[in-house]
Image: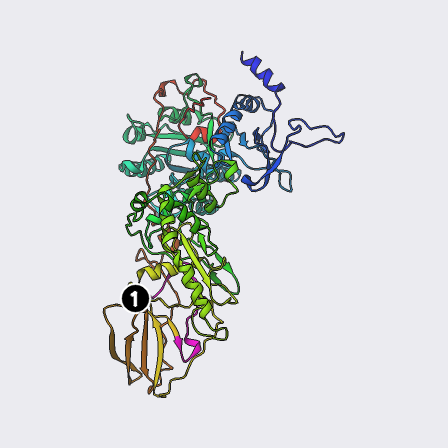
Amino acid sequence: MYSFCKFFSQQYEYFNAVLINEVDEDGDSVELGGEFLLEPNDHFNNLSVNLSLSVVQVPTNMYNKDPDIVNGVYWSEALNKVFVDNFKRDPTLIWQYFGSAKGFFRQYPGVKWHPDEHGVIAFDCRNRKWYIQAATSPKDVVILVDVSGSMKGLRLTIARQTVASILDTLGDDDFFNIIAYNQEIHYVEPCLNGTLVQADSTNKDHFKEHLDKLFAKGIGLLGNALTEAFTILNEVGEDYQNSCSQAIMLITDGATQMYDDVFAKYNWPERKVRIFPYLIGRESAFADNLKWMACANKASVPPQKNQGILLGVVGTDIPIQELMKTIPKHKLGIHGYAFAITNNGYILTHPDLRPLYQEGQKRKKPSYSSVDLNVPNAPISSVILYKLLYSFVFLGLHDLEQPDVALADEWTYCNTDEHHENRHLTQVQAIKLYMTSRKPHLKCDRELIQQVLFDAVVTAPLEAYWTGLALNKSENSDKGVEIAFLGTRTGLSRTNLFVVPEQDFLTAEDKEGVFNADHFPLWYKRAAEQVPGTFVYSIPFSPGMTFKHINTPIIDIKCYLIDNNGFILVSEDTSQRAQRTMMVPCDTEYPAFVSERTIKETTGNTDCGGCIRTFVIQQIPSSNLFMVVVENKCDCSSAPPVTMEPIEIIYILFNKPKKHPHCDRLKFQKDRRRPQSCHPFHPEENAMECGSANALNLSLVAILFPVLSFLISR
């Protein structure tokens, strides 16, 4: 039966992602290619895709007609129907895929892959982080490298490459360390003696660089190295949350003993730590000892007859924007924001995680501000709308469609992506369809819609009020209101321009002024913080604006207008007005000033080089402003001004100045939270059955990690 399947697989043709729609010199389709219909699709960033079939990618270093590959492609063809059905049930899905343990990668919808300039596609799904984390349990790994004199030359080079390959199989859930041994113990990273470090990309690259510093000399005392490795793993294993699978990887050219006394002391009878030896060199004199170590410490893999075979990993891509759409922004409060982190503490999205760009100097890209955590905010209008007549809903819909009304672009009131016929709808159109149709094919946030309709009705009289102000405004007047705007916590905003400015206040370039997916605009926050019935004054534009000002008639004083955070809004000296562009070091500290609203007036004195000058601060009623009057009798030009220049933070975690700072960073590890599933061993493993005829041709990933089984249901 097996021979028949293998013969059949060699005749089976499939759509290879690289070869589809390729022709030979005669114009005929190449083998494993064929005609494959591709059409542009806006749901997939206008890429040309096939929504009926998937394609298969095979790494360049693998034979795409290998019987194991073709057999796997053949039985996994049934996933085509599953992929198509999934996309029909949920049209918001994007890429779906299956990564096989054999190395091939099935992707839906079908899309053509293009090799690099050398004709190579190095992508191997088994080396991707998502595959490793899904297919394995968290591991604590200690790698022992023999650097005795017999490892000189090519053997040490092979050992370095072997260690690097092992590191590539570790993910963020794993912790590791590397110990080189001869007659002494040498930690590859000296500052990490007796501990483990997280296997993130930075740490792995750091250790790979240190591998080049290894050199071979002396004799190899493996017993001391094994004792050190077991000591580390046993200390880590005492914390249940941090421990799952544990392993010692041994790279050597041989072992003269079995070291059963070490195993009996540290690992038997539980055998919690697996031993994986890698024999380097052609001499087989000491191979039996290494094989015994592996068998006696559960390094064998259960025979295939137990059906504990990892078929692969099935997954789908989820854009972060889709996650953010599920956040009820209107319930977070003005200082509330949403962010997402992984179980290892890595930030997926955060409103204050902003890229940097270069334009003469390194600056923060214009974005938005945020404050810590959320302020509880209960819904205020849903009950009211339930009690009102249904005609009130139509009144709210009418107000939503007014030209001065806009809804937050990145907020989701209705999910228009689920059905193809609704994808062209704006959020206002979707709300109207949802409220007026008997059976609309839309999923909407009913509570949010009720509240935004309520806001639209309540704020509707502002349109007539603003229009009246505009009609009464003198055409030649350069004073008064230029733009009026209103925002509510449901994402509704109203805007009215009294004078068309050279630059609108709400621009696409400045995200601080608009409702965003994960924040309220800055002007909205500042107004909400202010005492009711007062105005908030700020400078909304970048430097370069000019203001008309009048010099103080009294030459012995200087006058300033500052806001509640200490920023100068108006000054006789234009160079002292607020500037918004600042240099941004990596980790920075900024001075912050917040006014105490209960203090209406205060006075004081300052010493300026032995000259005492007096100042008065007076709160301006119904505003966030303060008038500052300072005596001008003293020359204070030598005194440094208080600025908003950032101060770079220097972390000093350990009082050991002789060590390099990277040591402190390596030791300052994040807390690790183990995923709920843990598979440290297979229940049918038996060390007594190890070593007979188990010549298993498994990949490095399959050898390192426990065997899992995936059941694929149709």
Q: Is residue 358 left or right of residue 193?
A: right
Residue 129 position, x and y percent, is 45, 38
Q: Amino acid at mark 1?
A: Val
Helix, strand or loop: magenta stretch: loop
In the figure, residue 9 lies in which quadrant? top right
Q: Classify residue 67 by image quadrant.
A: top right
- Residue 713 visible to an observer of this rendering: yes
Which residue is painted at 53% across and 42% down in the image? 424
SS for callout 1: loop
Q: Along the horizontal axis of the image, is 653 left or right of 427? A: left
Question: Residue at label 1?
Answer: 594
Question: Is residue 56 rendered to the left or right of residue 323?
Answer: right
Q: Nearer the viewer, residue 429 or 614?
A: 429
Q: Within 10 Å of the Cα at label 1, are there few (<14), some (14-19), or many (20+) other Cα atoms?
A: few
The part of the chain drawn in magenta is 570-592
568 over 286 or under it: above or below: below
Q: Nearer the viewer, residue 21 or 435?
A: 435
Q: Which quadrant is home to the N terminus?
A: top right
Q: Please, is residue 662 above or below residue 412 in the view?
A: below
Image location (x, y in percent) of residue 703: 44, 28
One can see residue 327 in this view: no
The number of numbered discs placed on residues in the rendered structure image is: 1
Horizontal and vertical percent for residue 650?
36, 60
Point out residue 316 in the picture as x, y percentages from the top left corner: 47, 34
